Amino acid sequence: MWPPQLPPLPALTRAEGQLIDAYLAALDQLGRINPARGTSTYGSLRAAQALVGAAAELRDALALMHRRGESELHPATLGRALRVLDGERRAQRVAVPPQEGA
């Protein structure tokens, strides 16, 4: 049996696709660094080092969009792309988890 079909990604420019990819990469690294969720200083250190590269890719994607005249972000379209790519779950790792027993 095949897994359920994901909804299609919305049409994005190449730079918008790079923006989404870089944003999610940075988000994943921040989730690994989160001291309320992490268990290893070494793992958090490695994630912090990788975050530098992800931030540079994010900057480069935004700079490329700006150079190409893509002066506006389209939150509805980009938000749909983030949801299709599991951005909501990935963003939860950045948040402070609820207090136990509350």
Image (tube, rainbow, N blue to C red):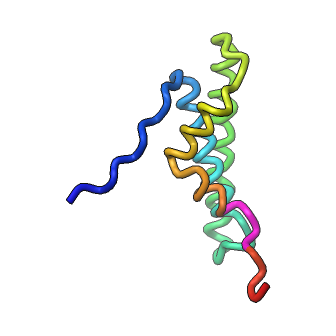
**Horizontal side of residue 6 vs 83, given as left or right:** left
Which stretch is magenta?
A: 93-97
Q: Main secondary structure of the magenta part?
A: loop
Q: Position of residue 77 (x, y in %)?
A: 59, 31
Instruction: Name the residue: 50% across, 45% down.
Output: 84
Which image quarter: residue 55? top right
Residue 25 is inside the magenta segment:
no
Which image quarter: residue 62? top right
Can the viewer see residue 26?
yes
Rendered-image quadrant of the N terminus: bottom left
Instruction: Name the residue: 79% across, 84% down.
Output: 102
Instruction: Name the residue: 42% across, 42% down.
Output: 7
**Horizontal side of residue 70 vs 81, given as left or right:** right
Can the viewer see residue 45?
no
**Horizontal side of residue 13 vs 76, given as left or right:** left
Q: Residue furthest left?
A: 1
